[in-house]
Amino acid sequence: MAIPVIDFSTLNGDKRGETMSLLHEACQKWGFFLIENHEVDKNLMEKVKQLINIHYEDNLKESFYQTEIAKRLEKKQNTSDIDWESAFFIWHRPISNIRKIPNLSEDLCQTMDQYIDQLINLAEKLSELMSENLGLEKNYIKEAFSGTNGPAMGTKVAKYPQCPHPEMVRGLREHTDAGGIILLLQDDQVPGLEFFKDGKWVEIPPSKNNAIFVNTGDQVEVLSNGLYKSVVHRVMPDKNGSRLSIASFYNPVGEAIISPSNKLLYPSNYRYGDYLELYGNTKFGEKGPRFESIKTMTNGHYNNKP
């Protein structure tokens, strides 16, 4: 099953329409896809991965294998409520906490900040394309996510350590993502990420050439009135290697009020007689404009009829 690939280099040429259609289909039918030629600096991406791996080896690896999680697996106790992962979360926007996280080197902090600056530009571009495909103003998703200082941005940094009994535990249990647009910089060697589609688990291969893997979260499904999907996924641990995952979340701020655009909603609370009257004059036209007219009626004086 071939995962959709969106080539951002085609968005400014004669293939733009084709690429936009592919993106729309990926959001509707898959809920996940790869982005190539995204213009995020690949040397910067490589440095982020390198520094995170160094941080894990120096500060987290040894202690992970002494946690209650590792002990329960070693004793072959119940592991249905645990995740085989070593993770921490960095907030970038609206306020950064990166320099409050223990043992992060200044080099890693600066490199991550530079990477996130570029990634936010990509996330905003993607949100504009998705809004356009939904027939909305291009800033609709960004504005829906925003507080006084714009949308939120955070990164979950995770290692899924080499696992002695991968058949007994999940790296990360089945879930959908609560937020908006998730942009994943992942391991280029070790697999493990799986998405559920059409009744089957689809294995997401390690990313080559620093392609960015994207999935849509629950808030995009709500904003799109269900047109775009938030899809169940999980991480399976590996017996032979540790998998790196750097998942950045372009999310609503906590005070954001989320609801679908009125443009994406069917009309409701109208009198059928009003619809029939309109239908008599527009029977041989497209139904879409008729639905929009009924929305206007239900928000106007027709709504006050007994």
Image (spheres, rainbow, N blue to C red):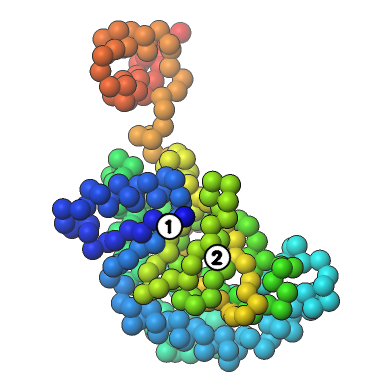
Residue 188 against residue 31 in the figure, above or below = below
Front residue of this view, candidates 262 and 6? 6
Rendered location of residue 123, percent (x, y)? 36, 61
Asked whether, in this view, residue 238 is left or right of residue 118, the answer is: right
Which circle's residue, 2 or 1, is located before the other in the chain? 1
Which three-letter amino acid code belongs to the residue tagged 2? Answer: Leu
The reply to whether the C-beta atoms of the residues labelled 2 and 1 are less than 8 Å apart is: no
Q: Residue at point 31% right, 25% down?
A: 288
Residue 17 seen? yes
Point 44% across, 45% down: residue:
29
Residue linked to disc 1: 3
Residue hosting label 2: 193
Percent of width and height locating residue 242: 58, 79
Quarter assignment of residue 118: bottom left
Amino acid on which disc 1 is placed: Ile
Q: Residue at x 40, y 7 (%)?
A: 273
Residue at the spot 47% in from the left edge and 40% down from the top edge: 226
Q: Nearer the viewer, residue 131 or 8?
A: 8
Mark on residue 222? Answer: none
* Residue most extreme to the left: 14
